[in-house]
Amino acid sequence: MQISSVNDVKIYNLSCGKSLPEWLSDRKKRALQKKDVDIRRRIELIQDFDMPTVSTSIKVSRDGQYILAAGTYKPRIRCYDTYQLSLKFERCLDSDVVAFDILSDDYSKLVFLHCDRYVEFHSQNGYYYKTRIPKFGRDFSYHSPSCDLYFVGASSEVYRLNLEQGRFLNSLQTDAVENNVCDINPVHYLFATGTAEGNVECWDPRTRNRVGLLDCALSSVTENTQVEGLPSVSALKFKGALHMAVGTSTGQVLMYDLRSSRPLIVKDHYYGLPIKAIQFQDQLDLVLSADSKIIKMWNTDTGKVFASIEPQHDINDICLYPNSGMLFTANEDPKMNTFYIPALGPAPRWCSFLDNLTEELEENPETTVYDDYKFVTRKDLENLGLAHLIGSPLLRAYMHGFFMDIRLYHKVKSMANPFAYDEYRKDKIRQKIEDTRTQRVQIKKLPSVNKELAMKLMEEGEDEDLLKKKKGKRMPSILSDDRFKVMFENPDYQVDEMSEEFRLLNPIVSKVNQKRKKKLRMLEQQEAPLQEEEEEPEGKASEEESSDSSDDDKSWVEEVRQQRKLLRQEEKARRREKKLEDRRTSLEPRFFEIKAGEEFRSFKDTARKQKLKKTTLEDRLKLEEKSGTLSVSDTTVGSKQLTFKLKKSEQQEKQQEAERQHHQERKRLRRAAGHLQSRPSRGRGRGRF
């Protein structure tokens, strides 16, 4: 996959790379893929997306599932299924295809205009019908409301073939000698044809009368363009109801508003080559115009270039996949190009993995290496004494430094440091001395982390090396392996010998090491030439070996049991210490902070609130129902009905309590006042009488 960037717009060429010939066997293809890196790294989006020699035109069906392409030699049409990412069918034809169109949503209805004046119709199962037009055709368009096909070519007439009646109708007579291209507006079905004299004639299919004439040859000549010869119309395309793009044979594209005879903008390709095809990108309001050398993408209103693509081979036709950033081209080459431009839109649904692929490539961009330039920072320039060159043409600013000519860099460096060769010579001598020192006896230094493990591995390695040298085999040790280097450098990998896992595993490891050492000694004794040993029958072990193994197993089991007992005792001691700490902490007083506006009643109230928070909704409803604040009843309809009383806040309760006490106090005072008034009157009466 080739990546290019124009105006900070990434363009991915998915068809770049080597292609394998069809006559190669699968075995040879697999062998080539293993050997050649370019073949292995290529992206084959659609299998067999090519033609034997040349591809002339390419189109996408309206449902977006099929891609059809016409090519030669031999003349043929190929249909690719995007859901299967492979070739669906291939049909060979009698003559070369000048233009073709898809009348249905899929590939079931196709029309081909051949170079020998034949018009061929294909159905889903293949060839259907063939007829002939009076003159050589160059282009045609389909008028769907009337089922008419309009053919233009080397004649002043526009031939009409009605597909419903199956016969030719009266032709449209134009003022041109020859007509090159034609198109029908998809909104109001205005028919337009481009002539060899550089005019565009517009016809109304309902009345079969000409409704307009545009002189594009005169309008294409501007102050900034140089035209050689008469500009004839070579491409024509409608956009919406009011806009139309016209391409000329001298390399200009004119954007028209149908309400005006003057173009809105004239875009020159500056190649002087005929415009082959024009496409529109509605989301970004762009025009894609292509001649045989370049595809330009530019803004409809301003004409500013958005991006451009220059394939290696000449272009015959282009096709933009609907609502996406994928572009197909038919070229003067067997392989049809596929370009993906994420700035135009997302990848189609059938190849959505391209979005993830391009995002990964953008996250890890490849660094560009410039052989003729050296990248230097500002500090490097100060060391070389070239800080005064900042801002001059000798330095090109880039990111946090500058690019300068490599010859100037070497020249200045040799002048700034004349003893560089002497330093280089001393470094080389020092390296040779260090190489000779490695052949001497070296003192083994233990690492800073896991010293005991490293010493153990060294001792085992020495014992195994003695045996491996005799057999001619050497295995790399863990200490010299870079994969385990961190284990002897990072303190996080330090072995904790006091941990439970290590203490339980240590008897097993030590026993395995002892067995390994015994085995090594026995092998050394067997290989000794002067030592004589008695052979024993196969399948039976000696008494000494069996007794040793049984003793080893017993000792190992005892050690494991002893370690387990120690671990249990330590665990009990830890629990006792924890209990003592809990008792000490429980005797100490605990203080609690009361929030502002709250009144402390008791610890039971807070505990009750905590319990209520943890209870479920059902339990809380039951408690409220018991307290009388909530009542649940069944209605006549069959559903539940909940009625509840709002709880009063603490402030409201306090206020009501104060008011109640105040009323009681007033009543008591009234009673006392009445009692006092009644007592003196009785006394006075008694005194009188």
Image: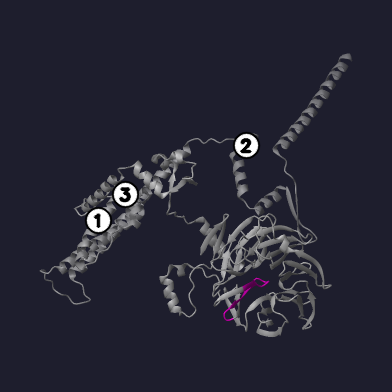
What residue is disc 3 on?
A: 449
Circle 1: residue type: Met
Secondary-structure class at tag 2: loop
Above or below: residue 536 compared with residue 321: below
Q: Earlier in the sequence, mark 2 or mark 1?
A: 1
Name the residue furthest top: 688
Secondary-structure class at tag 3: loop
Distance (Cα) linking label 3 and label 2:
60 Å
Quadrant placement of the C terminus: top right
Query: Residue 21, position in %: x, y?
Result: 48, 77
What residue is disc 1 on?
A: 458
Looking at the image, which is closer to me, 423 or 116? 116
Distance (Cα) linking label 2 and label 1:
73 Å
Classify residue 94 as left or right of residue 473: right
Circle 2: residue type: Arg
Is 413 included in the stretch rendered in magenta? no
Image point (65%, 34%), residue name: 597
Query: Residue 18, position in %: x, y?
Result: 48, 70
Looking at the image, which is closer to me, 82 or 118? 118
Q: Visible in this render: residue 387?
A: yes
Name the residue furthest front: 229
Q: What range of the chain is rendered magenta?
A: 57-74
Q: Residues within 10 Å of mark 3 (few under 14, many from 20)?
A: some
Q: Earlier in the sequence, mark 3 or mark 2?
A: 3
Distance (Cα) linking label 3 and label 1:
15 Å
**Dot 3 and dot 1 residues touching (CB under 8 Å):** no
Is 59 included in the stretch rendered in magenta? yes
Image point (73%, 82%), residue name: 134
What residue is disc 2 on?
A: 601
Q: Visible in this render: residue 190?
A: no
Above or below: residue 303 compared with residue 29: above
Q: Nearer the viewer, mark 2 or mark 1?
A: 1
